[in-house]
Structure formats: C-alpha cells, structure tokens
Image (tube, grey):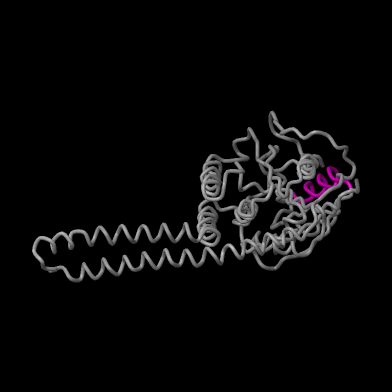
C-alpha cells in the first residue's frame, strides 16, 4: 500500500498557550504529515509559536471557525484530513487509530467521541447541551453519533471536496455531521481521551450564545434538507389553528343559519389557505432539495476512495480507547 498524504488542520484564535504543544504532539504522532495552522486574527503570538513548532501557518481574516474550516478545505489537498482544535484538550496520539479506522472500514468521517473523568474538562452544562443538540440531529437525520460537537475528526478526501461549508462559527460541527448523515456516507465514532485546558488557556465558546446559534443551524438545515416534513408540520399547525377558530362559527351557522362572527370566519379560511400553501411549498422545495442532494452525491462520487497506509504506523486492529484518567500531553 502507498503511504497516505495526511494533513492535520488546526483552526486557531488566541491559542498561544497551547498551540506549540498541539503542533509538536501531532508531528510526533503522525511523522510525515503536514501540520497546518490557520490563524483567525489572533492578537497574541499564536502564529509565531506555531511556526516555530514546525507548522505551516496561514491566516483567515473572516472571523469564525466555520470560515476557517471552509478556507482549509479549499486550500489543502490530501488523502486524509485530521481536524482538531488548537486548545490542547485532545490526545494527538489517538490520531493514527482514527485514521486506520477510516481506511480499514472505508469510511468518510470518523468522529472522536470525548471521554474524560475531569469535571473541569467537560462541564455539566456543556454535556447536557451536547446531548440535547446531538439527540435532535439524530432524531431528524439518523442516529450515528453520540458526540456531534467534538472538535477532533478525521475525514476522507471525498468528504472534504464535496462539503459546501456554509457556516461561519462554531455551528460548523453541526453542518459537518448533517452533511455526512444526509448523503448517507459511511461514518464511525471512536472514543478518545479528552482533558481540560492548560492554565492560561481560555475557551472561546459561549455556552448560551453559541448553543442558540447551533440550534438555529439545526432548524435551518432541517428546512433546507427536509422541506416537505418541515413545511408539512407548519401547514398542520396552521390547519389546527384554522379549525379551532372555524368550528364554533360553523356550529353557530348550522344552528341559526347566520354568521355573526364574519371576521373570525374570514380569518379561519385565510389561515387554512396558508396551511395548504405551506404544504404545496414543501412539495416543490422537496424536489429542489432532492436535486441538490443528487448533485452533492455526484460530486462525492467523483473523488476516489482512500486506500493506503499511515506513514510510520503498522496496521493493527483498532479498539476504542478507555482512558482511566487525565492524559498527559507529550511536549
């Protein structure tokens, strides 16, 4: 087998306290892989530290993780892509196992499910929010993942080159997941160790603001990818409101032959018409969505399947990691 061309993609914003360790760890875990750090307008020494550690450093001026991921996927050509946050919370030495799992099972995405015993690493509020948002996506698009918002993933080339990347911020993880599920790509999830941020490193995630943005993204993706179901639900709600307003008017007419509440009758009929229009819109947009999905599928099929070996690592069976405690970072 030929050695795989592996690219490690690290989006960064003010990660001077951690980026050096992250780059060195991945260079040690994946010898020969190209480590790319894309800086997102950092005001500290992130760029200089990453370059000194041996990374290829570029800058994306449009603020937001989604904008950085779109730029990375556009610029870089490789067989396998490893995307990880630059906060030094993920175990770089799990990357070969994730890549082997991707290649051995002919998958297009392997998600690193976060496993930790450190309370500070994965706060209760974040765990609850992740479960709720992941459950919502699984309910709409199919149950494949238990940690949709993980920042540690491995992709095939055909996934990356067929991914439109429309998000701007932290909702990019949701878009990545829905893209795989909507096209019925073969995917997997492997347990990986997760640890708290080192001292001096600050999270950029805002629990409530970004949670609301992710929820909004899920609803938009449901509307875009499942328009018939979405607009049928809207139409059903409008029909129920119309019936609630109109039934008393009809009963009164049957009893007296009069329609004294004419405005209510007109409102009821108008709302019912809107309900039928919503359903008709869903039918039309479902055809459009099917066409878009077919085009993405054709683009996906134009890219060859990954088949090769991880440089510097023997092919061995992959087993889920079960860390007993905090994982030390190799410097």
Where residue 179 appears, as percent x and y from the top left, is 63, 55
Q: Quadrant of residue 210?
A: bottom right
From this view, report whether residue 309 is shown above or below residue 299: above
Work out whether residue 99 can be spotted: yes
Q: Residue extending furthest top?
A: 324
Q: Quadrant of residue 25?
A: top right
Where residue 14 appears, as percent x and y from the top left, is 69, 57
Q: Nearer the viewer, residue 325 or 282?
A: 282
Q: Residue at x 78, y 43 (%)?
A: 95
In the image, residue 185 lies in the stretch drawn in magenta: no
From this view, report whether residue 166 is shown above or below residue 132: below
Which stretch is magenta?
18-31
Q: Nearer the viewer, residue 64 or 234?
A: 234
Q: Nearer the viewer, residue 78 or 246?
A: 246
For the N terminus, give its image quadrant.
top right
Direction from residue 202 to residue 100 in the image, left or right: right
From this view, report whether residue 16 is shown above or below residue 188: below
Query: Dominant secondary structure of the magenta stretch?
Result: helix
Work out whether residue 168 can be spotted: no
From this view, report whether residue 113 is shown above or below residue 54: above
Where residue 133 appears, as percent x and y from the top left, is 53, 48
Q: How many marks?
A: 0
Q: Residue at x 61, y 65 (%)?
A: 292
In the image, residue 20 lies in the stretch drawn in magenta: yes
């Amino acid at each position: 087998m030929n050695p795989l061309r592996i690219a490690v993609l690290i989006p960064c914003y003010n990660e001077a306290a951690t980026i050096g360790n992250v780059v060195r760890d991945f260079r040690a875990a994946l010898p020969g892989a190209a480590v790319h750090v894309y800086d997102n307008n950092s005001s500290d020494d992130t760029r200089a530290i990453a370059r000194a550690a041996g990374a290829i450093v570029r800058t994306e001026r449009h603020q937001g993780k989604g904008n950085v991921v779109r730029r990375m996927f556009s610029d870089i050509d490789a067989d396998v892509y490893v995307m990880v946050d630059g906060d030094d919370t993920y175990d770089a030495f799990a990357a070969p196992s994730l890549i082997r799992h991707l290649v051995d099972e002919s998958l297009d995405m392997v998600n690193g499910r976060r496993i930790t015993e450190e309370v500070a690493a994965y706060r209760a509020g974040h765990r609850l929010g992740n479960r709720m948002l992941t459950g919502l996506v699984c309910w709409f698009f199919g149950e494949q993942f238990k940690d949709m918002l993980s920042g540690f993933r491995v992709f095939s080339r055909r996934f990356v080159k067929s991914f439109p990347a429309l998000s701007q911020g932290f909702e990019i993880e949701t878009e990545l997941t829905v893209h795989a599920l909507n096209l019925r790509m073969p995917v997997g999830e492997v347990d990986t160790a997760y640890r708290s941020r080192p001292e001096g490193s600050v999270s950029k995630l805002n629990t409530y603001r970004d949670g609301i943005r992710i929820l909004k993204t899920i609803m938009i993706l449901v509307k875009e990818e499942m328009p018939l179901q979405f607009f049928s639900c809207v139409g059903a709600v409008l029909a129920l409101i119309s019936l609630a307003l109109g039934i008393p008017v009809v009963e009164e007419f049957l009893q007296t032959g009069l329609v004294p509440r004419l405005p209510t009758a007109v409102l009821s009929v108008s709302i019912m018409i809107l309900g039928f229009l919503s359903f008709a819109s869903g039918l039309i947009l479902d055809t459009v969505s099917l066409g878009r999905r077919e085009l993405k599928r054709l683009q996906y099929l134009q890219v060859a399947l990954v088949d090769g070996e991880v440089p510097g690592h023997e092919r061995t069976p992959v087993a889920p990691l079960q860390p007993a405690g905090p994982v030390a970072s190799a410097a």
